Image (cartoon, rainbow, N blue to C red):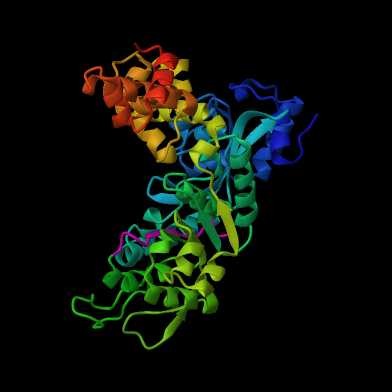
Amino acid sequence: MFINGKEGILYSLNVTKNVTALNEDTQERKLLNMIEHTYDGLVMVDKDGYVQVFSKAYADFIEINQASSIGKHVTEVIPNTRMHIVAKSGVEETAQLQKVGNNYIIVTRTPIYRDKKLVGAVGKLLFKNIGQFTALFRRLNALEKEVRKYKGEFQDRNKASYSFQHLIGESKAFIEVIDEAKKAAKGQATILLLGESGTGKELFAHSIHQASPRSMGVFVKVNCAAIPNDLLEAELFGYEEGSFTGAKKGGKPGKFEMADGGTIFLDEIGELPLHMQVKLLRVLQEREVERVGGLVTKSVDVRIIAATNQSLQTLVEKGKFRLDLYYRLNVIELKIPALRDRKADIEQLIHFLLAKYETIVGITSKGIDSQTITLLKKYHFPGNIRELENIVERALTLMNPGDWLTPAYLPKELKREQEHDEDIQPLAIQLEKAEKEAIEHSLIKAKGNKSEAANQLCIGRTTLYEKLAKHQLS
């Protein structure tokens, strides 16, 4: 039974790691020959990353022996490959640059599923004619120095690092906002991300860009709160030569120009000064920018994703944020839930963070015990996921290799708060205790004189005697 498309042809072969052992007259060999002539550059690996199919055109291109490559791990065959990663993660990588020797190739890596089970991955050069690649590589190499001269490593530094696959959680509230974000990613509308500090707003911004039609463009990040007010305009919109003391010769493009064709992420948008809000409004309305000291405007094609942990509506009421800008930004609003509102995700997040920081810290633990998980689920996490991440990193740093993550490794403040929460009793009981303690204290101070104690408590002697009997005080 065939799966539709190229992947179906490949997996219908049921190839083994020793492809050369196939009989020339078998159906498998005929299909292999067909693929050999149909696809110029193609490689297929199993779920463990071992090469199952490797076209001769691809082998010739990277100058290795085709037959000896079958059965080897793909990292031994293709330089700088990510085929084994895709075969494990199941995340497709489209039109990716990959360096082979002194050249760059553009490849697509696609996971292969069989009966909804990840069984491998197939990689293909995007152009069918290898000669076209060679011509393209020569041109890229010729332009490489010029690109570095003007842009340096800008493209590498300004790209999205996360996708929706990196968002951990299965709670209803979290899944709902992910679904909304995926729908929003397909369009071009401005998006406003709302949520407390540490909820993952930037991860959502990265993921939206990766899933958008602009994914091949740059992803420029700007923290509006981190740039001094007197430099903010030049950073966002650029400046012309001689526009101010210290201005670079030739001027400098701003973040919006750099993001042309891609996405710009404006974090902490609530911190933007009012005079800058006017210029941002113009970008949103006219899709053009004007550099500091400039005389002309420049059109920009950029999508804006903004984020804040403040209530912009409250800022509008206080006169600190423009109402017209708020409505321009709030085309699609996504509210990222706080960690305390998605307690069901805490255990999954802990295991993910343990695996992450075991690699970073260089220590292996036995895991986390149930008592610690229970304590963490009861905690309200004012710092959200960022705080949970710090807790896990701290514990791994302090524990011995092979230890369990137990409450002993949790911060004292967290344990103290848990103990305080557990000691809370009904108000009636607490009032009874307070009353008894007050009577005892007044009797001690009055040296047993009940009339004096009643005066100190501002109650009558009869009332005092009733309360003494009630609390069984002599």
Q: Is residue 310 at all visible to an observer of this figure? A: yes
Relative to 76, say whether 272 is above or below. below
Q: Is residue 22 left or right of residue 214?
A: right
Q: The C terminus lies in which quarter of the figure?
A: top left
**Residue located at (37% from left, 88% from top):** 295
* Residue 91 in picture, x, y percent from top left: 57, 39
User: Which image quarter: residue 116?
Assistant: top right
* Residue 10 in picture, x, y percent from top left: 69, 33
* Helix, strand or loop: magenta stretch: loop
Q: Is residue 387 left or right of residue 204?
A: left
**Residue located at (50% from left, 34% from top):** 85
Q: Which residues are magenta?
A: 213-227
Q: Is residue 320 left or right of residue 446?
A: right
**Residue located at (26% from left, 20% from top):** 449
Q: The N terminus lies in which quarter of the figure?
A: top right
**Magenta includes 226?**
yes
User: Which image quarter: residue 291?
Assistant: bottom left
Relative to 389, say whether 15 is above or below. above
Q: Is residue 262 at all visible to an observer of this figure? A: no
**Residue located at (63% from left, 61% from top):** 187
* Residue 266 in picture, x, y percent from top left: 43, 61
